[in-house]
Every structure is written in structure tokens, then in C-alpha cells.
Image (cartoon, grey):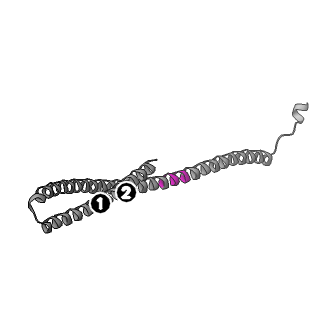
Amino acid sequence: MEEYLQVIPSELEIIKKDFEKRNLELEKKIERLEEEKMHLRLDADWRQEIREEKGKAGRWEKKCQETQLQNEALEKNLLESRSETDELKERIAELERSLHRYRNRNTAVELRASLSKIEEIKKRVEELEATLQDYEMRVEFFEANEERLKE
């Protein structure tokens, strides 16, 4: 008899239970969507950060290439200066040999003129050596700068 006396749920209670069940499912779905939204936002932030880093890397690469071009130009100038210095040293040696030959047969005026030329050339050599040292220091600076940029 108790079985027959059990209360049969009303239609309203059945609808209410269905509503609560559906509501629970929707709440879970909303939570999942919010998590996905958060992950997507993190992905977007991460992608933006990657783009920024790529931009920075591109700028550093460009600076590195510019430095390498400057370094190559300085090395070329250095080689030219060394070549010119060698030529001037050879010319000085030639003038000094000529001076020794002329000492025996030239007048004092000719000797003074030769000495003056030698002194001028020696000054020019000193200037070129100073320039050469300057270029060498620049090359070292750019090489060190290039190493820093590579790091």
C-alpha cells in the first residue's frame, strides 16, 4: 500500500528538476568557455610578445649588418693606409740612399733641400701612422661592438 501512497511528482517539480539539470550543464559550459577565453587571451598576449621580440631581433640584426659594413670599410681604409705608409717608407729609404750619394757630389743647398723633403716625408709618415693607429682602434672598437651585438 505504501507503494501506492508515494507522492507522484507533479509536472512542475519535473520541469523544475529538468531546469536545474539544464542550468547546471550550462554553468559548466560557461566555465569551460571562460577558461578557453582566458587561454585565448594568453595566446594572444604571447603572440604579441613574440612579434615584439621578432621586431627587436630584426632591429639588432640590422644594426649588426651596419656595424659589419662599417667594419669592412674601416679595414679597407686600414689596408690602404698601410699600403701608403709602406710606399712612403720606401720613398724615404730611397731619398736617404740618394742623400748619401749626393753628399759626395752635391752642394750644401741641395743637401738641405733633400733633408727638408725627408723631414716632410717623415712627418707625413708619422701622420699616417697616427691615422693607422686610429683606424686600428676603430676596428677593435667595432669588433668588440659586433661581439656584444652577437651576444
- The quarter of the picture where the N terminus appears is top right
- 53 sits to left or right of 64: right
User: Where on the picture, by quarter, is residue 125?
Assistant: bottom left
Number of the label disc, if any, that sits on residue 136: none
Q: State the SS at label 2.
A: helix
- In this rendered view, identify the residue nearer to me: 105 or 81: 105
Looking at the image, is 7 positioned above or below residue 146?
above
Q: State the SS at label 1.
A: helix
Q: CA distance from mark 1 to mark 2?
A: 18 Å
Residue type of the residue flagged with mark 2: Arg
How many numbered circles does the render carry? 2
User: Where on the picture, by quarter, is residue 21?
Assistant: top right
- Residue 49 covered by magenta stretch: yes
Residue type of the residue flagged with mark 1: Glu
- 17 sits to left or right of 85: right
Which residue is situated farthest in the right direction here?
Answer: 1
Number of the label disc, if any, that sits on residue 138: 2
Q: Residue at x 60, y 51 (%)?
A: 37
Q: What percent of the width, then of the height, locates residue 36?
A: 60, 48
Q: What percent of the width, then of the height, locates residue 49?
A: 52, 53
Kindly identify which residue carries mark 1: 126
Q: Which residues are magenta?
A: 44-51
Q: What percent of the width, then of the height, locates residue 150?
A: 43, 48
- 85 sits to left or right of 42: left
